[in-house]
Image (cartoon, grey):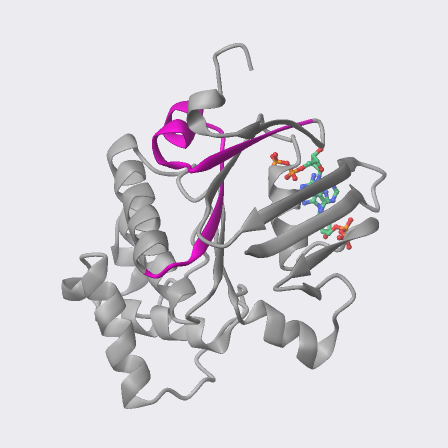
């Protein structure tokens, strides 16, 4: 079943910088897609047009068969509530404890400005604690986020995204700031969670070896275009 359909999407930023050139692609439910390519290739832009954090200059993105590119207000918020996002720099509220950071995910679209305005039920707290247990961070629940290591912070980022019970997770360079060991932990957890929850995940990376190890499908992007789309086994060295 198609979850995301990108139709002839191009993006030129207001600066005149071209980031995507006529991209078309569909992603099925259950896929663990890794988007690889050099810095500046357009990977982050490609991920961000899917939840409309970046608005395409032309073309459209359908999420769950609905046009998210033209969606506004309540409809956009509804569509986005099914899409969790994970960032390179975690975007946690550093002076707030881990549990509250996870609960912030309940508010939906995560931004630097998510604050403690939300009110949470006992059930929300229980779900948050269960998620923390799943990623091995139950003991850290009442620590301040900035007391954790980078790898731990990113696992909190995963829990926060899961708080929305999303159909899709977009992870933009989630391991770019992590050491190799923490990177493997984060990728393993993302992969396991995708499978066990019957979700779909799209991850941006620049390391081909890690892409090959975890992806069910690899999409190679260069200069705003798709230069490869296939299984890890099909990705040979020269590409
Ligand atoms: P959009 O066309 O999607 O509205 P903008 O071109 O207005 O996006 O840029 C959004 C923000 O990103 C602006 O505040 C801009 O200053 C900032 N920005 C500009 N250049 C870059 C860049 N190369 N990488 C990341 N962010 C940038
Ligand atoms: P990647 O994730 O592969 O590094 P990006 O999608 O971030 O690539 O960027 C693609 C191109 O668009 C780059 O040239 C980048 O500098 C530019 N770019 C990204 N965001 C913005 C922005 N907000 N405003 C202007 N240019 C941007």
Farthest residue, direction front: 1
> Considering only vertical position in the picture, is 161 above or below 180?
below
Q: Position of residue 213 (x, y in %)?
A: 34, 30
For image coordinates 65% across by 31% down, the residue present is 40
Horizontal side of 184 relative to 207 (left or right) equals left
Q: Position of residue 226 (x, y in %)?
A: 66, 30
Quadrant showing the C terminus: top right
Q: Position of residue 197 (x, y in %)?
A: 34, 61
Along the line of sight, the residue nearer the viewer: 191 or 136:
191
Along the line of sight, the residue nearer the viewer: 28 or 54:
28
Horizontal side of 163 relative to 48 (left or right) equals left
Horizontal side of 130 relative to 235 (left or right) equals left
For image coordinates 29% across by 73% down, the residue present is 128
For image coordinates 49% across by 77% down, the residue present is 107
| Stretch of the chain drawn in magenta | 197-222
For image coordinates 67% across by 72% down, the residue present is 76
Q: Position of residue 138 (x, y in %)?
A: 17, 65
Horizontal side of 150 relative to 46 (left or right) equals left
Q: Does the magenta portion include 75?
A: no
> Considering only vertical position in the picture, is 220 above or below 34?
above
Let me know if residue 52 appears in the view.
no
């Amino acid at each position: 079943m198609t979850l995301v359909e990108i139709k002839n999407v191009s993006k030129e930023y207001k600066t005149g910088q071209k980031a995507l050139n006529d991209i078309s692609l569909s992603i099925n439910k259950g896929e663990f897609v890794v988007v690889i390519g050099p810095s500046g290739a357009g990977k982050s832009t490609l991920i961000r047009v899917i939840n409309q954090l970046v608005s395409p200059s032309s073309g459209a993105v359908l999420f769950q068969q609905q046009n998210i590119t033209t969606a506004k207000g309540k409809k956009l918020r509804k569509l986005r509530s099914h899409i969790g996002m994970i960032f390179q720099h975690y975007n946690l509220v550093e002076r707030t404890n881990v549990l509250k950071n996870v609960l912030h995910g309940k508010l939906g679209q995560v931004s630097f400005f998510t604050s403690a305005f939300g009110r949470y039920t006992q059930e929300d707290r229980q779900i948050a604690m269960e998620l923390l247990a799943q990623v091995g961070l139950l003991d850290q629940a009442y620590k301040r986020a900035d007391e954790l290591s980078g790898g731990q912070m990113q696992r909190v980022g995963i829990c926060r995204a899961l708080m929305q019970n999303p159909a899709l997770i977009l992870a933009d360079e989630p391991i770019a700031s992590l050491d190799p060991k923490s990177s493997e932990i984060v990728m393993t957890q993302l992969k396991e969670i995708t499978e066990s929850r019957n979700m779909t995940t799209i991850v941006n990376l620049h390391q081909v070896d890690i892409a090959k190890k975890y992806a069910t499908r690899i999409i190679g992007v260069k200069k705003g275009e798709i230069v490869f789309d296939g299984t890890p086994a099909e990705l040979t060295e020269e590409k």
